[in-house]
Image (cartoon, rainbow, N blue to C red):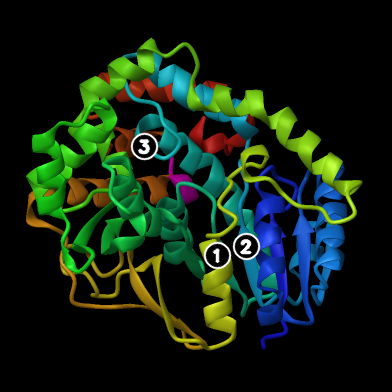
Protein backbone atom coordinates (compact mmCIF):
# COMPACT_ATOMS: atom_id res chain seq x y z
CA UNK A 1 0.00 0.00 0.00
CA UNK A 2 1.03 3.60 -0.58
CA UNK A 3 3.33 5.24 1.95
CA UNK A 4 2.85 8.99 1.50
CA UNK A 5 3.04 12.29 3.30
CA UNK A 6 -0.26 14.18 3.49
CA UNK A 7 -0.90 17.68 4.82
CA UNK A 8 -4.34 18.58 6.18
CA UNK A 9 -4.81 22.35 5.90
CA UNK A 10 -7.54 23.21 8.39
CA UNK A 11 -6.58 20.34 10.66
CA UNK A 12 -7.83 22.14 13.77
CA UNK A 13 -11.41 22.50 12.54
CA UNK A 14 -14.53 20.98 14.02
CA UNK A 15 -14.70 18.59 11.06
CA UNK A 16 -11.06 17.47 11.29
CA UNK A 17 -11.50 14.70 13.91
CA UNK A 18 -14.06 12.94 11.70
CA UNK A 19 -11.85 13.19 8.63
CA UNK A 20 -8.84 11.84 10.51
CA UNK A 21 -11.04 9.02 11.85
CA UNK A 22 -11.74 8.10 8.21
CA UNK A 23 -8.01 7.94 7.50
CA UNK A 24 -7.57 5.72 10.54
CA UNK A 25 -10.32 3.37 9.38
CA UNK A 26 -8.45 3.02 6.11
CA UNK A 27 -5.01 2.93 7.74
CA UNK A 28 -4.11 -0.33 6.00
CA UNK A 29 -4.32 1.54 2.69
CA UNK A 30 -1.87 4.19 3.93
CA UNK A 31 0.41 2.09 6.16
CA UNK A 32 3.54 3.97 7.19
CA UNK A 33 2.20 7.32 5.99
CA UNK A 34 2.45 10.66 7.76
CA UNK A 35 -0.48 13.04 8.20
CA UNK A 36 0.50 16.59 9.13
CA UNK A 37 -2.31 18.63 10.63
CA UNK A 38 -1.97 22.38 10.06
CA UNK A 39 -4.13 25.20 11.39
CA UNK A 40 -3.79 28.79 12.61
CA UNK A 41 -5.56 27.94 15.90
CA UNK A 42 -2.86 26.23 17.95
CA UNK A 43 -5.15 25.28 20.85
CA UNK A 44 -7.73 23.45 18.77
CA UNK A 45 -5.00 21.98 16.59
CA UNK A 46 -3.43 20.43 19.69
CA UNK A 47 -6.76 18.86 20.70
CA UNK A 48 -7.27 17.32 17.26
CA UNK A 49 -3.69 16.07 17.07
CA UNK A 50 -3.76 14.41 20.49
CA UNK A 51 -7.17 12.88 19.80
CA UNK A 52 -6.04 11.63 16.37
CA UNK A 53 -2.93 10.02 17.85
CA UNK A 54 -4.96 8.34 20.56
CA UNK A 55 -7.54 7.01 18.07
CA UNK A 56 -4.75 5.71 15.84
CA UNK A 57 -3.00 4.01 18.75
CA UNK A 58 -6.22 2.44 20.04
CA UNK A 59 -6.96 0.98 16.60
CA UNK A 60 -3.40 -0.09 15.83
CA UNK A 61 -3.14 2.23 12.83
CA UNK A 62 0.32 2.50 11.28
CA UNK A 63 0.10 6.25 10.77
CA UNK A 64 2.36 9.02 12.00
CA UNK A 65 0.32 12.09 12.97
CA UNK A 66 2.01 15.44 13.56
CA UNK A 67 0.84 19.03 13.82
CA UNK A 68 2.13 22.53 13.11
CA UNK A 69 0.84 26.08 12.69
CA UNK A 70 3.51 26.66 9.98
CA UNK A 71 1.83 25.96 6.63
CA UNK A 72 4.98 25.81 4.54
CA UNK A 73 6.61 23.43 7.02
CA UNK A 74 3.52 21.21 6.88
CA UNK A 75 3.63 21.13 3.07
CA UNK A 76 7.33 20.35 2.73
CA UNK A 77 7.78 17.11 0.79
CA UNK A 78 4.06 16.27 0.67
CA UNK A 79 2.51 13.96 -1.89
CA UNK A 80 -1.03 15.20 -1.25
CA UNK A 81 -2.65 18.21 0.40
CA UNK A 82 -6.18 18.16 1.80
CA UNK A 83 -7.61 21.67 2.22
CA UNK A 84 -10.66 22.22 4.39
CA UNK A 85 -10.70 25.67 5.96
CA UNK A 86 -13.21 28.44 6.65
CA UNK A 87 -11.81 32.01 6.67
CA UNK A 88 -13.67 33.98 9.32
CA UNK A 89 -15.22 30.87 10.81
CA UNK A 90 -18.92 30.28 11.16
CA UNK A 91 -19.27 33.88 12.34
CA UNK A 92 -18.46 34.98 8.78
CA UNK A 93 -21.01 32.52 7.44
CA UNK A 94 -23.67 34.16 9.62
CA UNK A 95 -23.02 37.41 7.75
CA UNK A 96 -23.16 35.55 4.41
CA UNK A 97 -26.64 34.37 5.36
CA UNK A 98 -28.05 37.33 7.27
CA UNK A 99 -27.04 40.25 5.05
CA UNK A 100 -28.60 38.90 1.82
CA UNK A 101 -31.79 37.96 3.68
CA UNK A 102 -32.07 41.52 4.96
CA UNK A 103 -32.32 42.62 1.33
CA UNK A 104 -34.75 39.96 0.16
CA UNK A 105 -32.13 37.63 -1.31
CA UNK A 106 -31.09 34.10 -0.42
CA UNK A 107 -27.89 33.85 1.61
CA UNK A 108 -26.26 30.42 1.70
CA UNK A 109 -22.78 28.95 2.12
CA UNK A 110 -22.31 28.05 -1.54
CA UNK A 111 -25.24 29.75 -3.29
CA UNK A 112 -26.08 33.36 -4.03
CA UNK A 113 -24.19 36.30 -2.55
CA UNK A 114 -23.24 34.30 0.54
CA UNK A 115 -21.56 31.63 -1.56
CA UNK A 116 -19.84 34.31 -3.62
CA UNK A 117 -18.22 35.90 -0.57
CA UNK A 118 -17.24 32.50 0.78
CA UNK A 119 -15.47 32.01 -2.56
CA UNK A 120 -13.68 35.37 -2.30
CA UNK A 121 -12.38 34.54 1.18
CA UNK A 122 -11.49 30.94 0.37
CA UNK A 123 -9.60 31.77 -2.83
CA UNK A 124 -7.67 34.54 -1.07
CA UNK A 125 -6.25 31.79 1.17
CA UNK A 126 -5.97 29.25 -1.67
CA UNK A 127 -3.72 31.59 -3.63
CA UNK A 128 -1.18 31.63 -0.82
CA UNK A 129 -1.56 27.89 -0.31
CA UNK A 130 -0.74 26.98 -3.90
CA UNK A 131 2.18 29.43 -3.93
CA UNK A 132 3.60 27.52 -0.95
CA UNK A 133 2.91 24.22 -2.70
CA UNK A 134 4.69 25.40 -5.84
CA UNK A 135 7.71 26.23 -3.67
CA UNK A 136 8.00 23.12 -1.47
CA UNK A 137 5.87 20.33 -2.98
CA UNK A 138 5.22 21.21 -6.64
CA UNK A 139 4.32 17.64 -7.59
CA UNK A 140 1.73 17.23 -4.82
CA UNK A 141 -1.98 17.09 -5.62
CA UNK A 142 -4.41 19.46 -3.94
CA UNK A 143 -7.52 17.64 -2.75
CA UNK A 144 -9.86 20.53 -2.02
CA UNK A 145 -12.74 20.27 0.45
CA UNK A 146 -13.12 24.03 0.96
CA UNK A 147 -16.41 25.51 -0.24
CA UNK A 148 -17.49 26.51 -2.78
CA UNK A 149 -15.40 23.60 -4.06
CA UNK A 150 -16.11 24.23 -7.76
CA UNK A 151 -15.12 27.91 -7.69
CA UNK A 152 -11.99 27.23 -5.64
CA UNK A 153 -10.94 24.50 -8.07
CA UNK A 154 -11.69 26.75 -11.06
CA UNK A 155 -9.43 29.49 -9.70
CA UNK A 156 -6.55 27.13 -8.93
CA UNK A 157 -6.85 25.24 -12.22
CA UNK A 158 -6.84 28.47 -14.23
CA UNK A 159 -4.04 30.26 -12.42
CA UNK A 160 -1.66 27.68 -10.98
CA UNK A 161 0.39 24.71 -12.14
CA UNK A 162 -0.70 22.78 -9.04
CA UNK A 163 -2.92 19.82 -9.88
CA UNK A 164 -6.28 20.20 -8.14
CA UNK A 165 -9.35 18.06 -7.62
CA UNK A 166 -12.29 19.29 -5.55
CA UNK A 167 -14.46 16.86 -3.64
CA UNK A 168 -18.00 16.65 -2.29
CA UNK A 169 -20.13 13.79 -1.03
CA UNK A 170 -23.23 15.30 -2.64
CA UNK A 171 -23.39 13.20 -5.83
CA UNK A 172 -23.19 10.06 -3.69
CA UNK A 173 -25.69 11.27 -1.09
CA UNK A 174 -28.44 13.20 -2.92
CA UNK A 175 -30.19 10.27 -4.70
CA UNK A 176 -30.36 8.08 -1.61
CA UNK A 177 -31.45 10.99 0.57
CA UNK A 178 -34.39 11.73 -1.72
CA UNK A 179 -35.32 8.05 -1.85
CA UNK A 180 -35.32 7.79 1.94
CA UNK A 181 -37.44 10.93 2.33
CA UNK A 182 -40.20 9.47 0.15
CA UNK A 183 -40.11 6.12 1.95
CA UNK A 184 -37.86 4.11 -0.39
CA UNK A 185 -34.77 2.08 0.51
CA UNK A 186 -31.70 4.25 -0.25
CA UNK A 187 -29.60 1.11 -0.57
CA UNK A 188 -31.47 0.18 -3.75
CA UNK A 189 -30.67 3.42 -5.56
CA UNK A 190 -28.07 3.66 -8.32
CA UNK A 191 -27.57 7.04 -9.95
CA UNK A 192 -24.96 8.89 -11.98
CA UNK A 193 -24.89 12.60 -11.10
CA UNK A 194 -23.12 15.33 -13.05
CA UNK A 195 -23.07 19.02 -13.82
CA UNK A 196 -21.64 21.54 -11.36
CA UNK A 197 -21.03 21.16 -7.65
CA UNK A 198 -24.27 21.56 -5.68
CA UNK A 199 -25.95 21.82 -9.09
CA UNK A 200 -25.65 18.25 -10.32
CA UNK A 201 -28.43 16.23 -11.94
CA UNK A 202 -28.81 12.54 -12.69
CA UNK A 203 -27.89 11.26 -16.14
CA UNK A 204 -29.04 7.83 -14.94
CA UNK A 205 -31.23 6.93 -11.95
CA UNK A 206 -32.53 3.48 -11.05
CA UNK A 207 -34.25 1.97 -8.05
CA UNK A 208 -33.83 -1.78 -7.67
CA UNK A 209 -32.98 -2.01 -11.37
CA UNK A 210 -35.98 0.04 -12.55
CA UNK A 211 -36.23 3.74 -13.53
CA UNK A 212 -36.57 5.77 -10.33
CA UNK A 213 -38.45 8.85 -11.57
CA UNK A 214 -41.75 6.96 -12.17
CA UNK A 215 -41.61 5.76 -8.56
CA UNK A 216 -41.26 9.36 -7.40
CA UNK A 217 -44.25 10.29 -9.56
CA UNK A 218 -46.24 7.55 -7.87
CA UNK A 219 -45.24 8.86 -4.43
CA UNK A 220 -46.41 12.35 -5.45
CA UNK A 221 -49.79 10.99 -6.54
CA UNK A 222 -50.14 9.21 -3.19
CA UNK A 223 -49.32 12.47 -1.40
CA UNK A 224 -46.19 13.73 0.34
CA UNK A 225 -46.86 15.71 3.50
CA UNK A 226 -43.49 17.39 3.98
CA UNK A 227 -43.20 20.53 1.83
CA UNK A 228 -39.49 20.21 1.12
CA UNK A 229 -39.68 16.52 0.22
CA UNK A 230 -42.66 17.20 -2.06
CA UNK A 231 -40.82 20.01 -3.84
CA UNK A 232 -37.69 17.92 -4.35
CA UNK A 233 -39.71 15.02 -5.75
CA UNK A 234 -41.82 17.34 -7.91
CA UNK A 235 -38.70 18.93 -9.39
CA UNK A 236 -37.23 15.50 -10.17
CA UNK A 237 -40.42 14.29 -11.84
CA UNK A 238 -40.95 17.50 -13.82
CA UNK A 239 -37.38 17.55 -15.14
CA UNK A 240 -37.19 13.75 -15.41
CA UNK A 241 -33.91 13.81 -13.51
CA UNK A 242 -32.82 13.70 -9.86
CA UNK A 243 -31.49 17.11 -8.77
CA UNK A 244 -29.04 18.13 -6.07
CA UNK A 245 -30.95 19.34 -3.04
CA UNK A 246 -29.48 22.83 -3.54
CA UNK A 247 -31.52 23.28 -6.70
CA UNK A 248 -34.44 24.19 -4.44
CA UNK A 249 -32.96 27.68 -4.12
CA UNK A 250 -33.52 28.23 -7.84
CA UNK A 251 -36.68 26.26 -8.64
CA UNK A 252 -38.45 27.39 -5.46
CA UNK A 253 -36.66 30.67 -4.83
CA UNK A 254 -39.53 32.64 -3.33
CA UNK A 255 -40.70 29.75 -1.13
CA UNK A 256 -37.16 29.20 0.17
CA UNK A 257 -36.66 32.91 0.76
CA UNK A 258 -39.88 33.07 2.79
CA UNK A 259 -38.84 30.07 4.89
CA UNK A 260 -35.33 31.38 5.54
CA UNK A 261 -36.64 34.84 6.42
CA UNK A 262 -39.22 33.46 8.83
CA UNK A 263 -36.68 31.26 10.64
CA UNK A 264 -35.31 33.05 13.76
CA UNK A 265 -31.79 31.72 13.23
CA UNK A 266 -29.64 30.93 10.22
CA UNK A 267 -27.91 27.62 9.58
CA UNK A 268 -24.58 29.08 10.70
CA UNK A 269 -26.10 30.32 13.95
CA UNK A 270 -27.48 26.84 14.60
CA UNK A 271 -24.02 25.35 14.00
CA UNK A 272 -22.39 27.91 16.29
CA UNK A 273 -24.73 26.81 19.06
CA UNK A 274 -23.43 23.25 18.62
CA UNK A 275 -19.71 24.07 18.34
CA UNK A 276 -18.99 24.04 22.12
CA UNK A 277 -20.68 20.62 22.28
CA UNK A 278 -18.41 19.30 19.54
CA UNK A 279 -15.25 20.39 21.31
CA UNK A 280 -16.51 19.09 24.65
CA UNK A 281 -17.04 15.69 23.02
CA UNK A 282 -13.56 15.71 21.47
CA UNK A 283 -11.92 16.63 24.80
CA UNK A 284 -13.92 13.95 26.61
CA UNK A 285 -12.67 11.36 24.14
CA UNK A 286 -9.09 12.32 24.96
CA UNK A 287 -9.63 10.67 28.35
CA UNK A 288 -11.35 7.57 26.97
CA UNK A 289 -9.32 4.33 26.73
CA UNK A 290 -10.75 3.68 23.25
CA UNK A 291 -11.83 7.09 21.87
CA UNK A 292 -14.89 6.87 19.64
CA UNK A 293 -16.51 9.76 17.84
CA UNK A 294 -20.29 9.88 18.04
CA UNK A 295 -21.71 11.31 14.77
CA UNK A 296 -24.40 13.31 16.56
CA UNK A 297 -21.71 14.98 18.69
CA UNK A 298 -19.23 15.64 15.88
CA UNK A 299 -19.21 18.18 13.08
CA UNK A 300 -20.00 16.54 9.75
CA UNK A 301 -21.05 13.14 11.01
CA UNK A 302 -20.21 11.51 7.65
CA UNK A 303 -17.66 9.12 9.07
CA UNK A 304 -18.66 6.20 6.88
CA UNK A 305 -18.42 8.37 3.76
CA UNK A 306 -15.37 10.62 3.44
CA UNK A 307 -14.83 10.81 -0.29
CA UNK A 308 -11.48 12.63 -0.03
CA UNK A 309 -9.94 9.64 1.73
CA UNK A 310 -11.42 7.24 -0.82
CA UNK A 311 -10.14 9.30 -3.75
CA UNK A 312 -6.65 9.53 -2.21
CA UNK A 313 -6.66 5.77 -1.68
CA UNK A 314 -7.72 5.16 -5.30
CA UNK A 315 -5.04 7.49 -6.62
CA UNK A 316 -2.02 6.63 -4.49
CA UNK A 317 -2.78 2.90 -4.59
CA UNK A 318 -3.61 2.95 -8.33
CA UNK A 319 -7.02 1.32 -7.88
CA UNK A 320 -8.59 2.81 -11.02
CA UNK A 321 -11.93 3.31 -9.27
CA UNK A 322 -14.75 5.57 -10.39
CA UNK A 323 -15.55 8.50 -8.09
CA UNK A 324 -17.49 11.73 -8.64
CA UNK A 325 -15.12 14.68 -8.46
CA UNK A 326 -14.79 18.29 -9.57
CA UNK A 327 -12.14 18.61 -12.28
CA UNK A 328 -11.48 20.50 -15.50
CA UNK A 329 -14.01 19.30 -18.05
CA UNK A 330 -11.54 18.64 -20.89
CA UNK A 331 -14.40 17.77 -23.24
CA UNK A 332 -16.09 15.23 -20.98
CA UNK A 333 -19.48 17.03 -20.85
CA UNK A 334 -20.42 18.68 -24.14
CA UNK A 335 -22.65 21.21 -22.37
CA UNK A 336 -19.71 23.07 -20.79
CA UNK A 337 -16.52 24.67 -22.13
CA UNK A 338 -13.47 22.41 -22.00
CA UNK A 339 -11.83 24.67 -19.41
CA UNK A 340 -14.80 24.69 -17.00
CA UNK A 341 -14.49 22.76 -13.74
CA UNK A 342 -17.39 20.29 -13.68
CA UNK A 343 -18.70 17.63 -11.33
CA UNK A 344 -18.52 14.32 -13.18
CA UNK A 345 -17.70 10.63 -12.63
CA UNK A 346 -13.95 10.16 -12.95
CA UNK A 347 -11.54 7.25 -13.23
CA UNK A 348 -9.08 7.65 -10.37
CA UNK A 349 -5.68 5.98 -10.37
CA UNK A 350 -1.96 6.71 -10.35
CA UNK A 351 -2.31 8.62 -13.62
CA UNK A 352 -4.62 11.10 -11.94
CA UNK A 353 -8.31 11.93 -11.97
CA UNK A 354 -9.69 11.52 -15.48
CA UNK A 355 -13.29 12.61 -16.27
CA UNK A 356 -15.41 10.02 -18.05
CA UNK A 357 -16.76 11.43 -21.30
CA UNK A 358 -20.11 10.93 -22.99
CA UNK A 359 -22.63 12.24 -20.45
CA UNK A 360 -24.99 15.18 -21.08
CA UNK A 361 -26.75 17.49 -18.66
CA UNK A 362 -30.56 17.07 -18.91
CA UNK A 363 -31.94 19.49 -21.52
CA UNK A 364 -34.45 21.27 -19.24
CA UNK A 365 -31.68 22.49 -16.90
CA UNK A 366 -28.91 23.26 -19.38
CA UNK A 367 -29.78 26.96 -19.44
CA UNK A 368 -29.54 27.36 -15.68
CA UNK A 369 -26.35 25.33 -15.43
CA UNK A 370 -24.80 27.29 -18.27
CA UNK A 371 -25.53 30.52 -16.37
CA UNK A 372 -24.12 29.04 -13.15
CA UNK A 373 -21.02 27.92 -15.03
CA UNK A 374 -20.43 31.41 -16.45
CA UNK A 375 -20.91 32.90 -12.98
CA UNK A 376 -18.45 30.33 -11.59
CA UNK A 377 -15.78 31.47 -14.04
CA UNK A 378 -16.36 35.17 -13.35
CA UNK A 379 -16.25 34.58 -9.60
CA UNK A 380 -13.02 32.56 -9.81
CA UNK A 381 -11.29 35.22 -11.91
CA UNK A 382 -12.43 38.10 -9.71
CA UNK A 383 -11.38 36.30 -6.54
CA UNK A 384 -7.93 35.38 -7.85
CA UNK A 385 -6.70 38.72 -9.16
CA UNK A 386 -9.70 40.85 -10.15
CA UNK A 387 -10.95 44.24 -9.08
CA UNK A 388 -13.99 45.33 -7.10
CA UNK A 389 -15.70 46.14 -10.41
CA UNK A 390 -15.06 42.62 -11.73
CA UNK A 391 -16.36 41.17 -8.49
CA UNK A 392 -19.62 43.14 -8.79
CA UNK A 393 -19.92 41.95 -12.40
CA UNK A 394 -19.61 38.35 -11.17
CA UNK A 395 -22.13 38.86 -8.39
CA UNK A 396 -24.63 40.40 -10.82
CA UNK A 397 -24.26 37.29 -13.00
CA UNK A 398 -25.28 35.07 -10.11
CA UNK A 399 -28.78 33.70 -10.86
CA UNK A 400 -29.89 34.40 -7.28
CA UNK A 401 -28.86 38.07 -7.50
CA UNK A 402 -29.41 39.16 -11.15
CA UNK A 403 -29.99 42.93 -10.76
CA UNK A 404 -27.19 45.49 -10.55
CA UNK A 405 -28.69 47.58 -7.70
CA UNK A 406 -29.04 44.47 -5.54
CA UNK A 407 -25.53 43.29 -6.43
CA UNK A 408 -24.05 46.70 -5.56
CA UNK A 409 -25.88 46.84 -2.24
CA UNK A 410 -24.97 43.29 -1.23
CA UNK A 411 -21.38 43.71 -2.32
CA UNK A 412 -20.93 46.91 -0.33
CA UNK A 413 -22.27 45.46 2.91
CA UNK A 414 -20.64 42.03 2.62
CA UNK A 415 -17.27 43.45 1.59
CA UNK A 416 -17.34 45.68 4.65
CA UNK A 417 -18.33 42.77 6.91
CA UNK A 418 -15.50 40.58 5.54
CA UNK A 419 -12.88 43.29 5.07
CA UNK A 420 -10.33 41.50 7.27
CA UNK A 421 -10.47 38.37 5.10
CA UNK A 422 -10.32 40.00 1.66
CA UNK A 423 -7.45 41.48 -0.37
CA UNK A 424 -7.48 45.28 -0.51
CA UNK A 425 -8.24 45.26 -4.27
CA UNK A 426 -11.73 43.86 -3.46
CA UNK A 427 -12.66 46.37 -0.76
In-image side of 49 versus 216 (left or right): right
Q: Earlier in the sequence, mark 3 or mark 1?
A: 3
Q: What residue span does the magenta drawing correspond to?
A: 383-387
Please name whichever residue, 378 or 275, is drawn nearer the observer in this view of the structure. 275
Q: Earlier in the sequence, mark 3 or mark 2?
A: 2
Give the Cα distance between marks 2 and 1: 8 Å
Looking at the image, do the residues carrying marks 3 and 1 touch, with CB atoms under 8 Å apart?
Answer: no
- The percent coordinates of residue 412 (x first, y second) are 44, 21
- The percent coordinates of residue 118 (x first, y second) are 49, 38
The numbered dot on residue 308 is 1
Q: Is residue 384 magenta?
A: yes
The residue indicated by pointer 3 is 111
Q: Earlier in the sequence, mark 2 or mark 1?
A: 2
In-image side of 357 versus 123 (left or right): left
The numbered dot on residue 82 is 2
Element at badge 3? loop
From the viewer's perspective, is residue 224 above or below residue 235?
above
Give the Cα distance between marks 3 and 2: 23 Å
- The percent coordinates of residue 96 (x first, y second) are 48, 27
- Closer to the observer: label 2 or label 1? 1
Q: Quadrant of residue 392?
A: top left
Amino acid sequence: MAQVKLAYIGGGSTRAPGTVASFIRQAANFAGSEIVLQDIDSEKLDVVCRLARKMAEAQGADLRITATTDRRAALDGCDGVLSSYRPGGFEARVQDERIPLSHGAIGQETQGAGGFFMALRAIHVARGLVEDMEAVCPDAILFNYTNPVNIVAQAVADHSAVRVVSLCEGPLVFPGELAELVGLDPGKVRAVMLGLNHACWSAEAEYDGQPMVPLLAQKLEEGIADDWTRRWAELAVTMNSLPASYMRYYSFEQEMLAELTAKPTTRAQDILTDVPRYWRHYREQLDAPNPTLVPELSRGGIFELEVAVDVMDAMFNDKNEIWPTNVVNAGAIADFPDSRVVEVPCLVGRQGVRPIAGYRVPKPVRGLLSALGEYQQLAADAAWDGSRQQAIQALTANPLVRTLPLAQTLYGELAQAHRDHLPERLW
